[in-house]
Amino acid sequence: MLGIWISELERDWKKKSKIMLFSAFIIVIIFNIWGLSSSQKGVFRFGEGSILLNNLNAPWFMMDGMSLLMMAALLPIIYIDQLSGELNSGAYRLYALRPYRRFELWLGKLLALAATTVVGIGIVYIISMIGSKTFFSSSDTTTLYGFKGEVGRLSAEWYTIKFYGVFLLTCLAKLLFCSAICVFISRPIIAFLVIFGLSIVLYHYIATELVFLFDPFRPILLSLHSGGSVSFWLYLIGSSILFGAISFWGWQRKVI
């Protein structure tokens, strides 16, 4: 199993197209940080006013918009290339000849993509921390979404860590969602369009709580609000289990 995981990681990280895509996204993030620093103020997209930004709250606020770009485009492209791309090209038939059970091959691929996601989110977190200390005013207290009054440095930094931790969980839920679609649709372009469309349909017509599959910024802030959001966690965990079950069920029955 470890050999499958390492093999998938090596093939995933050697693709120059993915490296260039992620590098371009990092450049966009840097420009976004620089743009926010010009006004030192953050305006919420969902009509809840604005907050003054500093080195303590800028690291998570700069993901407003960036999280939408990641969930709607960047991550699906990365996931689909690894999931549907190899199935469509027939390349995965060669890997399926190895002496492993089907679910081990699929699990190894998902774990490799999960590891790639963890590394990617970690890099974004580091850049956001460096950018906030470089471009924003330094402060020992700050304002957080939904909190009355200001909080200290330790509380603010812990809030940022929790934000990126929850964001990582939503990204992994997106991975399972993509895997559930790609196991049935092997053409990458069609798979992307279906995933993009279903992400919108699910929260518009099925359950608004599923908006984290398309734009997770506000749901994450609400989940970190004092008192939290129970429905967010129920849908996040429940949908991850459901998508994972559909993915493995489909893979066991798929004709390669």
Image (tube, rainbow, N blue to C red):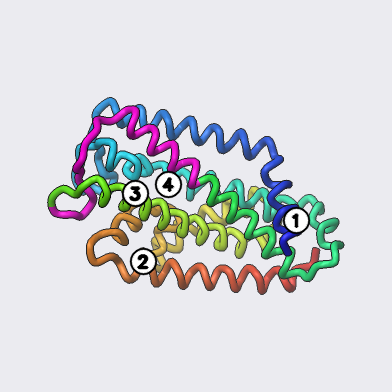
Using the image, tell me which numbered label, if any, was put on residue 87.
1
Cα separation, mark 3 vs mark 4, equals 18 Å
Q: Residue at x 69, y 50 (%)?
A: 9
Dot 1 or dot 3, earlier in sequence = 1
Q: What residue type is labelled 4?
A: Leu
Cα separation, mark 4 vs mark 1, equals 27 Å
Viewer-nearest of labels 3 and 4?
A: 3
Dot 2 or dot 3, earlier in sequence = 3
Q: What residue type is labelled 3?
A: Thr
Q: Point out residue 75 in the picture as x, y percentages from the top left corner.
A: 54, 48
Look at the image and give the residue range highlighted in magenta.
121-148
Circle 3 — which element? helix
Viewer-nearest of labels 1 and 3?
A: 3
Identify the residue under disc 2: 232
Using the image, tell me which numbered label, if any, was put on residue 121.
none
Circle 4 — which element? helix
Cα separation, mark 2 vs mark 3, equals 18 Å
Dot 1 or dot 2, earlier in sequence = 1
Identify the residue under disc 3: 160
Viewer-nearest of labels 4 and 2?
A: 2
Dot 4 or dot 2, earlier in sequence = 4
Residue 111 in sight from this viewpoint: yes
Q: Which residue is drawn at 69% across and 54% down?
A: 84
Q: In this view, does 22 lie to the left or right of 170?
A: right
Cα separation, mark 1 vs mark 2, equals 33 Å
Contact between labelled residues 2 and 4, with CB atoms less than 8 Å apart:
no
Dot 3 or dot 4, earlier in sequence = 4
Identify the residue under disc 4: 68
